[in-house]
Image: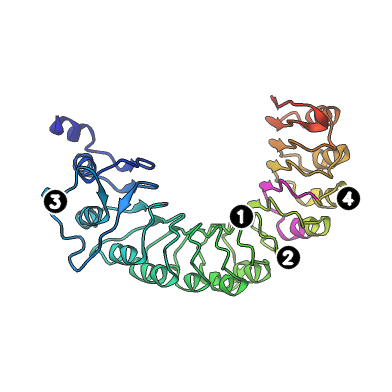
Amino acid sequence: MAQSVQQALSGLCELNLAGLRDLADLSFNRLSSCAPSLERLSLAYCHLTFELGPARGSISPQDSSPSQFSFCNLLRLVQEWAGRLRALDLSGTGLPPEALQALGQVAGLQLQELSLHSCRDLSTEAVATLCFQQPGLTSLDLSGCSELTDGALLAVSRGLRRLSLGKLQRLTDAGCTALGGLQELQSLDMAECCLVRGRELAQALGSMHGAPSQLASLSLAHCSSLKVLQFPQLRQLSLSLLPEFTDNGLVAVARGCPSLEHLALSHCSRLSDKGWAQAASSWPRLQHLNLSSCSQLIEQTLDAIGQACRQLRVLDVATCPGINMAAVRRFQAQLPQVSCVQSRFVGGADLTLTL
């Protein structure tokens, strides 16, 4: 049976075992041995046990546990796969700093993607060491690693294209200045980094050595101290859950980010028709717009958006009490190419229209 399975999985490149809390060494080893071409592995939220000592990673196959999934066993296999493993997801496994250090120094390992989401015990020093050990990283997820400070950004790999730093509430504008060295960065998630105001971030990423930023996607949702954004090439932006975000801020973002195609502003309760009357004309490329739970918007808001944003395909105005169904229907008549309008509970009605 093992030979049949190995033959069937001989070309398997990606294995996702996320959330298997009862995964054990024995079953994992049997499965992974049938995938000799494995390049990407997800063990997110699996229950890993950590017993690192002087002989870390030196256990043999017969020592594999039938009831526990140990980091030492995983490390031994990573050592075997070092020449081909490119992506690893250990999010939510409780990875301690010494385990991350042991992983990063595996001989021959050249990771391109690493996700450590919600590994809350990781230290700034451990992340800095990892980035030094794995300079080829292009994607790094550190969201929810709550102990990390600005120092972690000083060491991130220069070739990163995707970086997730959500819920790092100790991260400040001083750390944002270090992002200026990431000349290939395309996607940045800093949602719920409550001390980030945006000015230093814009200065760091807005123009590097005279070349325009390659940043295409940015999330600053719930960054309550946000002040200014200027990214002319940005295509995707999330500013949801900013209750202090005003019409003036909306107009400033429209002027600073005129190339947006996807924009999320849900629960920005201070935005009004006045702001949209000035901002809409700056976004002719807009295709996806989320305005759900923006309580001050009215039917004239949709008129302004419909007249200016002629490329719009998807609109969400759910739970906007100032917008009624008549306005939604008029908007759809104005832009017949819109494929979906999420309009639950507008004007007290519960309705979602999909064309």
Q: Position of residue 275 (x, y in %)?
A: 84, 52
Q: Earlier in the sequence, mark 4 or mark 1?
A: 1
Which element type, helix, strand or loop, lies under badge 4?
Answer: helix
Query: 274 and 58: which one is in front?
Result: 58
Q: 10 Å neighbourhood of mark 2: few (<14), some, or many (≥20)?
A: some
Which element type, helix, strand or loop, lies under badge 2?
Answer: loop
Q: Position of residue 314 (x, y in %)?
A: 68, 36
- Residue name at image x 65 percent, y 72 percent: 200
In contact (CB < 8 Å): disc 3 and disc 4:
no
Q: Earlier in the sequence, mark 3 or mark 4?
A: 3
Instruction: Determine which residue is flagged by label 2.
Output: 227
Instruction: Determine which residue is flagged by label 4.
Output: 274
Mark 3 is on which residue type? Asp
Q: Position of residue 63 (x, y in %)?
A: 13, 51
Report if residue 253 lies within the magenta region. Answer: yes
When asked about the image quadrant of residue 21, the answer is: top left
**Position of the N terminus by quadrant:** top left
In contact (CB < 8 Å): disc 3 and disc 1:
no
Instruction: Determine which residue is flagged by label 1.
Output: 219
Q: Which residues are magenta?
A: 252-269
Cα–Cα span, label 2 and label 1? 14 Å
Report if residue 60 lies within the magenta region. Answer: no
Q: Is residue 338 visible?
A: no
Instruction: Determine which residue is flagged by label 3.
Output: 63
Mark 4 is on which residue type? Lys
Query: 244 and 13: which one is in front?
Result: 244
When asked about the image quadrant of residue 327, the answer is: top right
Q: Is residue 292 visible?
A: yes
Location of residue 115 with respect to 26 vertically, above or below: below
Mark 1 is on which residue type? Ser
- Residue name at image x 83 percent, y 48 percent: 276
